[in-house]
Image: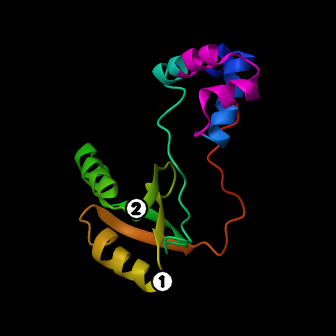
Amino acid sequence: MKQTDQLDACDRRIIRELQRDAGLSHAALAEKVGASAASVWRRVRQLEKDGVLGRSVRLASAEALGRAVNVLCQIRMTRQTIEARAEFEDFIQSRAEIVECYAMSGEWDYLLRIAVRDVADYDHFVMRGVLAHPSVAHAASNFALRQVKYTTEIPV
């Protein structure tokens, strides 16, 4: 994977612009970064090949889709074996409500961000899903009151 110090100024501009709007045509992107469309096309393909750029997606509105309640849930495992973690991580991948999951250092083993409709939806999910999982010993939940900052842009 290409490291940040190996990116030139044009690559950095391309990355910044695509993080803001992945739907830009190569011609529009080229105009924004001050390069030819052919050069931009080659650079984008190389950045994808190098693993710097991933797949392109459209960001959906959680509010418009009825999933505006964000819950941060900390998980402590019953066992720390590779098998137990793999089984739990498979469970995580299978649940659409879990939109982010981080393996953590410290007191808790995982941090989940869960997008649900309301408190009752979360109660059902956590009681019948998360806490019912054999690898989960404890869970602590915090409901987000409001989102102060959200970005998908990585500083370049």
Residue 2, visible in the rendered structure: no
- Vertically, is 125 above or below 10? below
Mark 1 belongs to which amino acid?
Val
For image coordinates 42% across by 78% down, the residue present is 122
Labelled pair 2, 1 in contact (Cβ < 8 Å): no
Measured as percent of width and height from the top left, residue 7 is found at 66, 17
For image coordinates 33% across by 61% down, the residue present is 95
- Vertically, is 49 above or below 155? above
Q: Residues within 10 Å of mark 2 (few under 14, many from 20)?
A: some
Left or right: where 119 falls relative to 22: left
Q: Main secondary structure of the magenta part?
A: helix
Magenta span: 22-44
The stretch drawn in magenta includes residue 32? yes
Q: Nearer the viewer, residue 71 or 108?
A: 71
Q: Secondary structure at mark 2?
A: strand
- Vertically, is 118 above or below 88? below
Left or right: where 9 falls relative to 54: right
Q: Secondary structure at mark 1?
A: helix
Residue 49, visible in the rendered structure: yes
Left or right: where 7 falls relative to 131: right
In three-dimensional space, the C-alpha distance between marks 2 and 1, rounded to whole angstroms, equals: 22 Å
Measured as percent of width and height from the top left, residue 3 is found at 60, 19
State the residue position of label 1: 119
Mark 2 belongs to which amino acid?
Arg
Q: Quadrant of residue 154?
A: top right
For image coordinates 37% across by 74% down, the residue present is 126
Q: Residues within 10 Å of mark 1 (few under 14, many from 20)?
A: few
- Return the mark for residue 76: 2
Measured as percent of width and height from the top left, residue 117 is found at 47, 78
Locate the C terminus by quadrant: top right
Q: Nearer the viewer, residue 75 or 17?
A: 17
The stretch drawn in magenta includes residue 149? no
